[in-house]
Image (cartoon, helix red, strand yellow):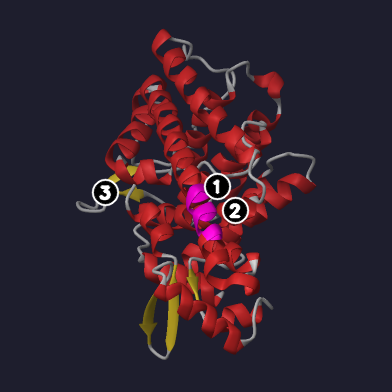
Amino acid sequence: MAYNRLQAFNDLPPLFPVEVNLETPEIFRQLAKASRHLGELNGLCASLPDPQILINTIVLQESKDSSAIENIVTSQDELYRAATEEKTLDHTSKEVLSYRKALYTGLERMQIQQNLLLTNTMIEIVQTIKQNKAGIRNTPGTALKNGISGEIIYTPPCCENVLREKLESLERFINDPALSSLDPLIKMALIHYQFEAIHPFSDGNGRTGRIVNALYLVQQGLLSQPVLYLSSYIVKYKTEYYQLLRGVTENNNWHDWVMYMLTAISETAQLTTYKIRSMLALKQEYERSVKHILGSSFNYDLVRLMFTLPYLKIELLEKRNIAHRQTASVWLKKLIDADILRPMKMGRTTYYINFRLMDLFVND
């Protein structure tokens, strides 16, 4: 049956066998670049003495960018302040922080499940993002519409039995290397399209799909840590992203879609490598400076916290058993005087901001 955007696309074909040529010279050239830049990023991550310091900060930024694709917009201030509080009443910040939790949840589940990326893990990811118990869609009528005109641009498959069948097929493609001899980065492009086309959940599909990207790279041994996030690239080229997804559905144009994804991997890997190197250099500079400023009372955990949560407050240092209130107050005052941290009063609370670290994310 011919594709009709107004009807549920229950005839969405599986990814195997792949019936288009994805081994063109143009794709191979872009694949070589993406692989090289991803390898450089992975080597850098493997050399980090304390990767969790930097990963948490990068994950928060990805959470913000990924949510922005869905028009869930929060400011840098709201996001990092909410992370410092470790709780928030602001709905958008809560959704963004849930993305970070969902990524870590998915990584943990994959490690428990013998490095398999399963449908149940995807369900748990979306439930963590949305903070509910929603599962696979089971009601007809879901359609993706143009945000301005309201025109239906795609009607995904329906309903639960069909969606589970297609997810099972996708699960096999992800986890069984015998089904495809394609390079993993090309496979990732196919996987991402297929998940978005299945659109298995009522909400949170885009964010879940982008988490699946990161987990797949870890599963394939291409990254030791889930630090490559394509959301900043997709935000920048959002119109093209959706046009190319439609191009696969409507015209079987896999070539341009794969090129887009390989370019996204290459550019994002370079940007992430730059950010991590910049963060490492800043951390080393701050460690020397803070040692000099605080002298014998220097505590490395303070510097560590500055790069894990860029918005500090006195109560946080107390809670982490880094310093008592009076000592924390003295330390933070000295770091303000040295222009290492800058204060920001919000309500009754004063936050002490690692502003140079924040600048790394504002100025991509």
Callout 2 secondary element? helix
Q: Nearer the viewer, residue 290 or 189?
A: 290
Which is the main secondary structure of the residues drawn in magenta? helix
Q: Quadrant of residue 355?
A: bottom left
Pointers 3 and 1 in contact (C-beta within 8 Å) = no
Residue 27 percent across, percent down from the top left: 43, 16
Closer to the chain start, of discs 3 and 1, is 3
Q: Quadrant of residue 75?
A: bottom left
70 horizontally vs 19: left or right: left
Q: Is residue 146 visible?
A: yes
Q: Is residue 337 above or below residue 261?
A: below
Q: Which residue is mark 3?
A: 146
Q: Amino acid at mark 2?
A: Leu
Q: Which residue is mark 1?
A: 211
- Seen from this angle, which residue lies furthest left? 149
Which image quarter holds the N terminus? top left
Q: Nearer the viewer, residue 244 or 108?
A: 108
